[in-house]
Amino acid sequence: MQHRPDGGTKAVISREALQQLIEALSAENCRVLGPTVRDGAIVYDEIAQVGNLPAGWTDRQEAGRYHLERREDDALFGFAVGPQSWKQFLHPPVETLWTARQGDDGISIATDRSETPIFAFIGVRACELHAIAIQDRVFLDGPYRDVTYGMRRQDAFIVAVNCGNAAATCFCASMGTGPKVDAGFDLALTELIDATRHEFVVEVGSEAGGDLLDRLPHRPAANADLLAAEAVIARTQSAMGRRLETDGLKELLQANLNHPRWDEVAARCLACGNCTSVCPTCFCTTVEDHSDLMGSSAERIRKWDSCFTLDFSYLHGGSVRTTASSRYRQWMTHKLASWIDQFGTSGCVGCGRCITWCPVGIDITAEAAAIRATPQSRKGEPHGGT
Amino acid sequence: MVPESVSAAASLPDPFVPQIYRVGRLRRELHDTVTLELAPSAGRRPAFRPGQFNMLYVFGVGEIAVSLSGDSTDETHFVHTVRDVGAVSKAITELGTGATIGLRGPFGVGWPVEAAEGSDVVLVAGGLGLAPLRPAIYHILANRVRYGRVVILFGSRNPHDMLYRHELEEWRQHLDISIEVTVDHAEADWHGNVGVVPALIPRATFDRHNTIALVCGPEVMMRYSASALAEAGVPPERIYLSMERNMKCAIGLCGHCQFGPTFICKDGPVMQFARIAKIFAIREV
């Protein structure tokens, strides 16, 4: 095998070896998850074989629009990103935190951690690796740690993919989060497909990844293979459909909390929360308490929540953020500005999902650019609320 | 591939899981407000600092954030003063002695009672806002010699719904504490101040160059109190407010209590006014 100082071991595997990779992970009791076509979209679901992957499909995305098209080849990863992210597995939409029982001597509370799955993710994009790293910071690096997130996360095996396609809504290049995967994976694939071959350059990112590669048929990557892989990434980089100017963006937004653009975007925003659902870093949750009809047991459920709901900021007497403009402002300034204060990183990875899945096509890059184009004075009048 | 912090976290106790506490003595403060003593069903009561809060869970109903209102040196139980304003707070006010309750905490950043040593201390409270300040008052009274002038300014809706009235009268017996009380509305039999609590600030006696102000109450009351204190010459970095926002987790993970770049649950609830003054002036943050 060939070693390069700027990365791990690199090898080349065939489509058949990818099948063996899936089988090997399944044999280790992993829940193997990857992209597959369902309901006219590419979603992440159980993968038993290579045939479950979206061979020959690609996605066309624009603000508020998404559809699948056939490709001219049988590429397995020839698309950008779909509506879902790996967040749904590591930070599930609904989770039981604990169960309480009412006994003769009062209540008792217990947790059940027996069902924690071991995940293997196939086809994690560079932006998504960054999103996972951001959620790691949110859930694991603070004074309190999210124990169940940590349990799901610690055993997850990650097979990344360097993107061969950029959607019109993609802007990872300007966020510094892609399209090339740089860290946080066990194995990383680059798909090489043309009239003469269909192979994958594999980069090893961890010991577990190296061990698995050793069990698959592979050959050392030749220089021509590596050049071909780099060409794939370079092509994707240059095809990036959008960009977000991040220079000074945090300070710009935080100095423009009374900018009239917030009211303009609120006139279009439905406050539906789609952007927060599809965002791979949005982490907000609420809780619900349920009890059985006998009143003898109760459980506490944690669910994804959205800062676009009126309920999100409710205090006795009313909600803090009653207007859509204040809620859009909260979402975007959190994502692009205060996230940096809180976690030392932007909350945006440039995946473009919030643009594609916004029913009215609100574009975060355009909203940020609009404020940049017309910055208001720091001492703006308090919000008129008109 | 998994960073080290990931594997380290999985073995820690789960901060989402409440501990079981038992309700001890109860005291009905007002028609809608109850003070409860809560003792751990096992082990010792954790230490707390004046200004911190706990998350209280009532079986099958839900969980809310409630400030500690008792004496931090009493190690046998937590004390909370709860007003019935919602489903969970109502259920808490209806608990009887001996009932069990889930409790997580204490959480958050408290009042700067140590940093205030050597200074005059002005405590400004509105309504139930006196409850989170009471542990600071106990601490200051127990360590009276370490502080300069102590001024308590308290605003209540009316003379009948005055929280801790008996204790206010007791504290007033101290010759080295100044207490001024005002009410929003009163009948003819009230001969005290009528008006909002920030109006008491210009009339209070304290050394504006060496004062720490602790403010707790409804947000609008804190807004005007902070302005009045600043106008009286107290620098914004010596004014502290106890902020309130919707809270679900209390540990910085649910996102609800964000106030600009801060999480009220872990960066507060007690916040230095200088730190938040800019966003405090903006609506609906």
Image (cartoon, coloured by chain):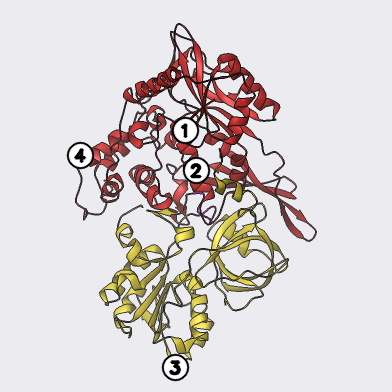
Chain colours: A red, B yellow
SS for tag 3?
loop
SS for tag 2?
helix
First-in-chain label (2 vs 4): 2
Tag 1: amino acid: Gly
First-in-chain label (1 vs 2): 1
Query: Is A234 left, or right, of A33 in this rendering?
Result: left
- State which region is magenta: B247-255
For the residue pair A133 and B42, the one nearer the viewer reads as A133
Disc 3 designates what residue? B175
Q: Main secondary structure of the magenta part?
A: loop
* Badge nearest the viewer, 4 or 3: 4
First-in-chain label (1 vs 4): 1
Which dot marks residue A7?
Answer: 1
Disc 2 designates what residue? A135
Which quadrant holds the N terminus of chain B?
A: top right
Q: CA distance from mark 3 to mark 1?
A: 74 Å
Tag 3: amino acid: Leu
